[in-house]
Amino acid sequence: MNSAEKNDKLKRRQHRVRKRVFGTSARPRLNVYRSQGHIYAQIIDDTKGHTLAAASTLDADLRKSLKSCSTVAAAKAVGALLADRAKAAKVGAVVFDRGGRLYHGRVKALAEASREGGLQF
């Protein structure tokens, strides 16, 4: 399978997930994007189109403490940081958007760390 086919399948999974997942003011959407080298997460209110909180391995706070940005430990750190920023933005409950990726590895680690930090989904 070449990379164009892989990207096409990923786009189909993303659309399938996004048909069912929508963030409101009461329960915004926690979106996760995973690249080969980094992981990004943001909490989005889809009705207003605003990002309420965001965290990634590119944050200056995390880059100093992480040995590598593409590990499960880095994803856990991003999840914990996102949960702290969500508390500051007064967000308690979210819906989880895995972005077409499997709930496994770094995506799962980020989700579990944000749950431990106080987010409910």
Image (cartoon, helix red, strand yellow):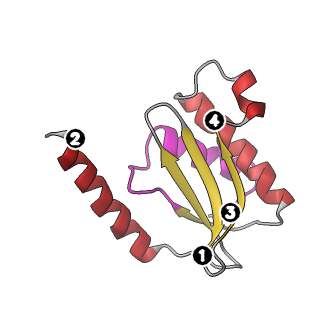
Magenta stretch in the rendered image: 97-120
In the displayed structure, 35 sits above or below 111; it is above
User: Horizontally, is 106 left or right of 85 in the view?
Assistant: left
| Marks 4,1: beta carbons within 8 A | no
Of the numbered discs 4 and 3, the one sitting upstream in the chain is 4
Crowding at mark 4 (Cα within 10 Å: few <14, some 14-19, many 20+): many
| Residue bearing mark 4 | 57
Q: CA distance from mark 4 to mark 3?
A: 22 Å
| Marks 4,2: beta carbons within 8 A | no
Q: Amino acid at mark 2?
A: Ser
Q: Amino acid at mark 4?
A: Thr
Of the numbered discs 1 and 3, the one sitting upstream in the chain is 1
Label annotation for residue 120: 3
Q: Is residue 23 magenta?
A: no
Of the numbered discs 2 and 1, the one sitting upstream in the chain is 2
Q: Amino acid at mark 1?
A: Asp
Quadrant assignment for the N terminus: top left
Give the mark toward the camera: 3 or 2.
2
User: Horizontally, is 60 left or right of 108 in the view?
Assistant: right
Q: Position of residue 62 (x, y in %)?
A: 72, 31
Dividing the picture into quarters, in which one does residue 120 lie? bottom right
User: Horizontally, is 88 left or right of 75 in the view?
Assistant: right
Q: Amino acid at mark 3?
A: Gln
In the displayed structure, 92 sits above or below 80; it is below
Residue placed farthest to the top in the image? 67
| Residue bearing mark 1 | 46
Q: Position of residue 76 (x, y in %)?
A: 63, 37
**Residue 74 vs residue 57, the one in the foreground:** 57
Dividing the picture into quarters, in which one does residue 90 lie? bottom right
Q: Is residue 104 magenta?
A: yes
